[in-house]
Image (cartoon, rainbow, N blue to C red):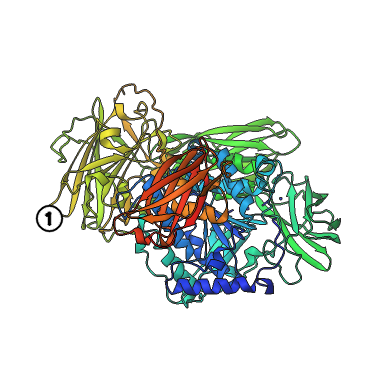
Amino acid sequence: MLRPRPLGRRETEVGRADVRGSLAVAAVAFAALAAGAGGLPAAAEARGPDLDVLFIGAHPDDEAGGISTYGTWAEERAVQTGVLTITRGEGGGNAVGPEEGPPLGLIRENEERRAVRRANVRSVFNLDEVDFYYTVSAPLTDEVWDDRATLERVVRVVRETRPNVIVTMNPAPAPGNHGHHQVAARLAVEAYEAAAGPRAFRDQITREGLRPWRVGRLFGDGAEGEGATGRDCPSRFKPAEPTDEVFGVWSGRRSLSGRTWAQIEVEAQREYASQGWSVFEDPPADPAKLDCDEFTQLAARVPYTPADPRRDAMLEGALRERPGGLPVGTELFLTTGRFDVVPGSRVALIVHARGARRFGPAVARLRLPAGWSGPRRVALGRLRPGRETTATVRLAVPGGARVNRRVRVGATLRAGGREGTTRHVLRIVPPVRGTLEPLPQVAEFGAWAARTGLERLDTLVKPVATLPSGGTRALRVELRNRSRERRSGTVALRLPAGFAADAPSKPYDALAPGGRGSVTFQVTNTDPALETSEQGGDRGFDIVTTTDGAESTERAALELVPATTIPRAAPVVDGVESPGEYPGAAIDLSRKWEGDDPDGAADASGSAKLAWSADALHVLVRVTDDVLGTVLPAGDAKRHWRTDSVEIAVDPRGDAENTSRTYKLGVFPVTREGGPAAARDADNRQGPAAQTAPGTRFASRVADPYDGYTVEVSIPFAELPVTVAPGGMGLNVFIYDSDTQDKTGQTRLGWSTWGGVQGDPYRWGRATLAGFTPPAVPAADPVFPRGAAGSVDSPQSIAQAARQRLGLSGGPRPGTRVRIHGRPRRTGDALVVRLRSSGRGAAHVFAIGAGDRDLGSRVVALRPGVTRVRVRVPTGRIGLVRRAAVGFEAPGSRGGLGVLARVAPGR
């Protein structure tokens, strides 16, 4: 799945005698948690923010899949893990109440803190970016988030907390991968490098007193390949890409509580109730049926043991020594000037080393791929702390090397009677390589991967192109000459049955050394009877490129999407199909794209009919269903995937890179008030239809006795974000089915069905509006939700920042000094707090109880001097107040500081 580049210093090996006290604290903590205690002993809390492992994700719950691993490490190795979350997830659904926006974000932060505490994770950092909606686009996420400012705050947290291992998500635009997840992972990769550099965000060093911090190893959670269950799952995993470095931690190990870590992880995941996770089932009771958490190494500065099946293998070199291994803090890694090499070429390999202490002389022994030549022994001299030593050697790639495969170069460093190993991956490519033109977001990812030295991640995204059923499209093959000579040759496509190209092959001529070119084919689906969407799957084909008589092959895939021609008509929007209203054929909506398989057509199935008139698109959807899901009040008619609903998605021109240029309407067939409701979501403009689509009309009919419902919608072309292209409009219609009353969906059906398809307009179906002349619609700029709770609004974040003496939101501590003057006192039904400030700003003052629970709050303006603040507390709850928490933000700042004080005894 993921990969390397140039530790923070950890003086002792975790698990040795000098951390026995910490292990004892961890044991007591876990015993308390197992018994249902609400917190950890003060000794554990007092250890501060000096972290061993830091997970970096986009939303609360992104860390949930690794909880069993972090808990295992904490219990057995006293490893302290922290979680950095870019947003509070206020753009998600809410299965526990009507809250959305900032109030939902605070609920989700609370869920996250309760969940990760089961793995002894006490440090949760929120950066306060907005979770605007589900998108699969990293470029769109960058557009909404200030990526440079966000990176600065990630780097600050890394430098402040000094983790030796970072775990993050998948940075690639794989189908369905949330764009926020992609960007969170990219920020983690960039922070891994930037935190180590003395020139990156230099003010943190010169003004804030922080120091560069060199993280030892970087991992992505998850891996591509075939796994196994049982205790041996770490050694039995087979990566899809053999050169991937994948490490596993078995979830079947029992904790001090007697439960497996898989069970504890599920119990933790149920804490994310707002996301519908409270219904998660118990894992298998038989440990032999439990699998591993897998992690793919993205980068390492330190030596490690490849293919190590031990549960703490990911910590080697960064936090623990292996027997006979180099001291923790020693660095060893390899770099090359390029990732792609051609047969017969030479490549410069640089060996980098840094000592945890003075020792030497150091010698690196190289392990080269079969047939390669070059030095096998590299002298590095004496190693010193804080000083990098390098040696450069040139390796020769054999002229007959097999192309389009990856190889490893290994190095084992020996010094002071100890040794450690590292590996580096290169790809052998033909002199001229022909590849399918990538999707825009894939091309953007490729450019980012090249900038960060992670080109090997390109295997995470299969090269694909969509094609309408029975239609034709241009397929562009990109060419790159990596040799030192001009090259000429041909490109051919070996297409699967049911497809044809406009020519058997096409030439390219005199492509310059290092140059780029392309050839374009017109490809037609000649058999419209072929299954479309996921049901038809990826139809692989070969791109065959010849260069001076030599042939190489690259694999790509075609994906068929359904197509339809929409007739003209003028339906009446009443939820009933009258004769002549929809003269065309129905489209099938009964294919699953996510969730559980329906128990037959009566459980969940449906169809839609379409028509256009001079000013609107008309859609009639019939749904067969056996159980009506949660009926929501009209005021909570949002996040339609939580219950029974229909979604209509329109990409007017059929070329939108993401859904911000589309129209997506979710329709609930019934509300508690009786009628239907509709809202737009994750598109050009979100919110209730009355505000975001005032001209859209909708109606419904719910069967009695219930066996389904009908929804009818009329969408004015003028409300679409741009003028329609009548020859190739993008369209999809989805059915969301829920058989529960807890606001959790079970099954998602639709017309063009792929995983994550609701965010992928290029995989929607294609609709032709025959004879239609569209009215001109000026392009509308997308509107994004901007409301996000700040850490100054969270008593839990404030309390943590105060205990750790760190700034809020990953920002610096402001220059203004704020403290609580005297001890806060309970007076009647209020908590009275006196604040002394050296400057102006806003104070968010909270009366908090056990577990940093909010019992009352108030925001006041501060001026230099003492300000008396009275915080009202609900009647009868003043006795529950234990502390005052104050979040302070200076004018124009993004961050702030936290202040905490115990309440004086008595009333």
Q: Secondary structure at mark 1?
A: loop
Viewer-nearest residue: 625 or 634:
634
Against 447, is 275 above or below? below
Residue 469: x, y in percent?
38, 40
Q: Is residue 889 visible?
A: yes
- The amino acid on which the numbered mark 1 sits, given as a three-letter code, is Pro
Residue shown at 15% from the left, 40% from the top: 577
Residue 337, horizontal then vertical, whole percent: 74, 44
**In the depicted structure, whether residue 413 falls above or below residue 159:** below
905 relative position to 391: left or right: left
Q: Which residue is mark 1?
A: 705
The residue closer to the viewer here, 758 or 486, is 758
Q: Position of residue 485 (x, y in %)?
A: 75, 35
**Circle count:** 1
Q: Is residue 24 above or below residue 870?
A: below
Report whether residue 60 is seen. no
Q: Is residue 53 left or right of residue 388?
A: left
Residue drawn where x is 77% and y is 57% of the image: 368
